[in-house]
Every structure is written in C-alpha cells, then in structure tokens.
Image (cartoon, grey):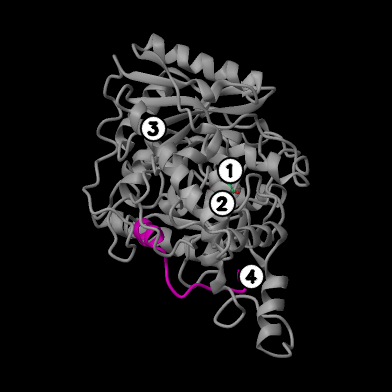
Amino acid sequence: MYHTKTLAELSAMLEAGEVTSVELTQSFLDRIKQFDGELNSFVTVTEELALAQAKAADKARASGKAGPLTGIPIAHKDIFCTEGVKTSCGSKMLDNFISPYSATVVEKMRDAGVVMLGKTNMDEFAMGSSNETSFYGPVKNPWNTQAVPGGSSGGSAASVAARLAPASTGTDTGGSIRQPASLCGITGLKPTYGRISRYGMIAFASSLDQAGPMAQSAEDCALLLNAMAGFDSRDSTSMERDVDDYSASLNNSIEGLKIGLPKEYFSEGLDAGVAKQVDDAIAQYRAMGAEIIDISLPNTHLAVPVYYVVAPAECSSNLSRFDGVRFGYRCEDPKDLEDLYKRSRGEGFGAEVKRRIMVGAYALSAGYYDAYYLKSQKLRRLISEDFSKAFEQVDVIMGPTAPSTAFNIGEKTDDPVSMYLSDIYTIAVNLAGLPGMSVPAGFSNNMPVGLQIIGNYFEESRLLNVAHQYQQKTDWHKQIPEAFV
Ligand code: GLN
C-alpha cells in the first residue's frame, strides 16, 4: 500500500514514524520482484545495498539527522555511474562495467539519505525514443504491455508509472525525460542546461545532455530537484548560481500567468486525441486565471534536422572512448590493434549507436564540417532566439510533449525518421538549453497524454509552481495502471 503514495506523502510518513525506510524499501523491492519480470524496467536491482542504505537512513532519522528525502527509495537511470555497481548505459559495450566512482547526482542523492533500489533500463547510450535499442530488451509500458514506454529513460518512466519505485532519475538530450514521462503518465522535469552536474553521467551529446527528476507529481519533482541541483567544479558546464528552494513557490497563485501557445506545436502531425487533452488542459489554466496568448516559434521545423547533426557529431566524439582497451567490451582474440578496435566497437555497439557514430563522423569530417556541423550550429542559434523573443511576451510556453500516445513495440523500429519525429516538440528545448516539463493531462484511447510546459532559463521554480497548480485541480497524475494497483 505504500506504492500508492507520493514521495511527499512517504516523506511525511517516515517523519511521523508510521513506517521505516527498511519497511518501505522492502515493499518496493517486493513489487519489483513481482512485476518487473514482465516490465523489464530494471537492468540491475541492488537489493542488499538498498537495505543497507535503508538501515542507515533509519539510524540517521533516529538520531535526528534526517532531511525530507532520508530513507526514500528511488531508482537511477543506468546512465549514472554508481560506485561498485554495474553501469551499462543500456549497452553490451558496458555490460561488464562496474563503475569505480559515483556520478554527482548519485552522490547528492545518497548524501540526502536517498536509498537506491537499482538501475533502470534505457535505450543504448540514451539514443532512442522507445527503449527498443537497449541491449537488455525493450521495456513495456505499464498502461499496455504491447506498447513502448518511450525513451530513452523508458525504464525510469515505466518503473514509476507501475509504482515499482516512488520516483527515479532520468536524462534528457532531446526529450528523454519528457517523452517517456508523457507516454507513461508521470511527471518529468528537464532542468536548464547546467543546473545539474553532468559529472559521472555517461555522455551522449554534451551540449544537450541534462539530468532531471521523474516522479508522480510536480511536488515530488521539486523535492528531488532540491537535492540534485547545484554547482559542481567537476563539470565545466555546471552553472555557479544559487539553487532555489523549489518546494517554496509551489503554492503561488498563477492568476495572470501569461501562457504562450506556439502555433507550430498544434499543426498537422499532432494526433487529434492528444490535441484534445492538451486543449482541455489549457482551458483548465484559463479557468485558473491564466492569460492565453498565441505565439510563433518560426524555426521549429529546423529542430529535428539540426539535432540529428549536432547530437550524432557530439556522440561520435564522446563514444570514441569505448575502444576495447581501457574498459568495457573487448572482442575475443584480436589479431592486432586495428582488429581490436574494429571488432570491439563493431560487436559492442548496437545498430542505432553505429548509425549515429557514422552520421556524426561524416558531419564533422573536413569536407563537410562547414556544410553540416557549422550550419547546424547557426540554425541552433536561430531556434534559441525564437524562444528568447517568445519569453519577452509570455511567462511559459505550453503544448503537447509528444505528437501521439505510446506506439506499439516494433511499430517504428524499421523507420528511424518516424522514430526521430517522436521528439519533434521536445528537441528545440534542448537545443536552446531551456527547462521543460511533462505533466499528465489525461488519456487518449486509454493511453496517457502529456502536457509540455517550457520555461525561461533557470525558471524551474515557476515551471514546478505552474504544474503543481494544475495538479491541485486535476487527478491525472494520480492514476495507476489497473494491473499495478
Ligand atoms: N530520442 C532522442 C534521441 O534518440 C532523444 C534521446 C535523449 O533525449 N537522450 O536522440
């Protein structure tokens, strides 16, 4: 019965002594055992470690040293390095990799007293929108196990949707927190680029990657962000800037809030059932006193093409470290060094990762750099400027998170372009480095729909406030798929 509670409720129960962290942790471990055979949302369950951490959390609480997250169990996406625990990034390349250190996000969570239940399944090296590129097989969507959970943080999203964990961490390079949150009916926040340290988070596209919380509600995301955010001297792109108390402004009134609706986010390609739910959500905001303003982000159509030059270019460089020499997969009996490189990479990486490395290496090559990479960087600037102009007029921007609800497993695997279009509304936000959220906004054909809320730089507090106010008036975020109640 603990699984029906939000993180904020569990925190209050721990504080009141109604449950111990050991009991709580055990109950989620039991649910993982019961349900995850089918869902496949975890790559690794760290049962022993979790119970040891839970014991320590109970002890800390008994001696008066507890914060709001002390003793709360969560799951980490398998992209975050975890000391002494396998960190696979969803790849055969790292199937044998036991990280010698922990990512800053993991350390910060541990310092806050959070218990780690395990590591969640994901698209290989975070490249994908459906979790089907994982070496460990696809994750199932708890709302319909024929359907994908979205990706790349699909394991994190599915585990929270099925309440196998009260919350999880994710990362978002082009939509990987928001799109799976939308497809699984949970709340996810991608903060401003630089708000959370990338140290120890396995790099995909370094100018886009950002970690964030995935949870049941905006209130829970705020609690997690309080612990995750902050400057880190080990990440040169981390911002030296004060961290807000993200829980403090949740209850602010949103009367007079100016919401921009970009016409490009409501055009052809958007599923009618999704559009209906998003319209209803906007109507709800209007009823709460917000002002709705039509805006335009004219370079929206460039976001996906620009991303599929910039992200592969950066990934081809980042993934060159996986060479079969220092760590990770090494082929059997290499003939010579070249054979070692070629076969280790050839056998260790899956098809989508190879496709991106090849595209990226091509775009960066001497003859094509100006035509592709440099050009994309210029267009990226135009995309950012669209948002800057919009934020002169409005406080937040709203629209759908994804163009459709969850599609079926196998439906898009042979058509990479249609798969890439799953992120058509999320990718521009990463290119601009802005914060964005996905909030459950109802169902279409019994599958969850997400409302996207985009804010100006470092306005996470405002996003969480805007989302929380909606969640005070609606109960979409409280729905649990029938098989997991
Ligand atoms: N689906 C996008 C991609 O495949 C975004 C992934 C992500 O945000 N990590 O690149």
Q: Quick one: label 2 or label 3, which is nearer the N terminus?
A: 2
* Contact? badges 2 and 1 (CB < 8 Å): yes
Mark 2 → mark 3, Cα distance in angstroms: 21 Å
The residue furthest top is: 287
- Residue 110 image-quadrant placement: bottom left
* Disc number placed over residue 379 in the picture, else none: none
* Contact? badges 4 and 1 (CB < 8 Å): no
* Disc number placed over residue 93 in the picture, else none: 4
Provide residue 356's location: percent of width, then percent of height.
Answer: 63, 57
Tell me the element at label 3: helix
In this rendering, the answer to whether 362 lies above or below 38 is: below
Q: Is residue 142 left or right of residue 250?
A: right
Mark 3 → mark 1, Cα distance in angstroms: 18 Å
- Residue 459 image-quadrant placement: top left
* Disc number placed over residue 309 in the picture, else none: 2
Q: Which amino acid does the dot numbered 2 rest on?
A: Val
The quarter of the picture where the C terminus appears is top right
* Disc number placed over residue 305 in the picture, else none: 1
Disc 3: which residue: 387
Q: Which residues are magenta?
A: 93-110
* Contact? badges 4 and 2 (CB < 8 Å): no
Q: Is residue 365 left or right of residue 39?
A: left
Provide residue 72's location: percent of width, then percent of height.
Answer: 41, 49
